[in-house]
Amino acid sequence: MDGRTALRTAADRPVRRDAAVRSDAVRRPRPPLTFSLLSGWQRQVLGTPGPPPFRTGDAHAKAGRERCALTPHTPAVFARCPAEADGPGVPLPARAARACLDVAFFHPFDDGNARAALLALAFVLARESVTLHKVGPLRTVRYADDPDGAADLAVLVTILIR
């Protein structure tokens, strides 16, 4: 592979990844957000030959100010989160914010968790035929267990939908 081919392949990754998210979102029956889906999208984001596994050690966020510990139960707890956020009567912006924050909080991958969190948000919205255009990475200075920060993200998603 020459340099131009490698650059073109890397530049095509976001397009392929976004198409995969939209395609997965409209499948019938409606698929739940799972680690397997996220891992497949991460493979495309990172350009790896196979889907990346759940991280195998502690993760750190916000330049090391937050530590995301890994216990034997972390992957199973993370796997239950999307179903909890998809309950009846939960408004779409809150579901999308919850999916995004779950990925950001659990840091399931060694690399690319901010992108994965945004993809989770986009997936939840796309299942309801909502697409956000030109939304870049969301950065937060709040801690993972801050309920006001979660509510603020849901409000921001509501504004972006409009």
Image (cartoon, grey):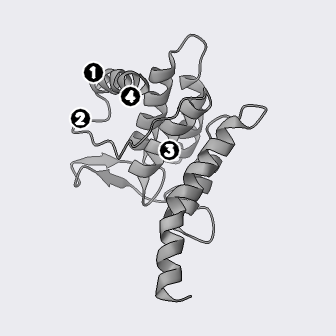
- Assign a secondary structure to mark 1: helix
Instruction: Give the residue type at disc 4.
Output: Leu
- Assign a secondary structure to mark 4: helix
Image quadrant assignment for residue 58: bottom left
Instruction: Give the residue type at disc 1.
Output: Asp
Can you tell which of label 4 and label 1 is closer to the viewer? 4
Nearest to the observer: residue 1 or residue 73: 1
Q: Between marks 2 and 3, how big is the CA–CA gap?
A: 20 Å
Mark 3 and mark 4 in contact? Answer it, CB < 8 Å: no
Residue 148 badge: 1
Mark 3 surroundings: few (<14), some (14-19) or many (≥20) residues within 10 A: many
| 130 w.r.t. 33: above or below | above
Residue 43 rendering spot, x and y as whole percentages: 57, 62
Asked whether residue 147 is in view, the answer is yes
Residue 142 badge: 2
Mark 1 and mark 2 in contact? Answer it, CB < 8 Å: yes
Residue 89 rendering spot, x and y as whole percentages: 56, 10
Residue 119 badge: 3
Residue 39 rendering spot, x and y as whole percentages: 58, 54
Can you tell which of label 4 and label 2 is closer to the viewer? 4
Residue 106 rendering spot, x and y as whole percentages: 43, 43
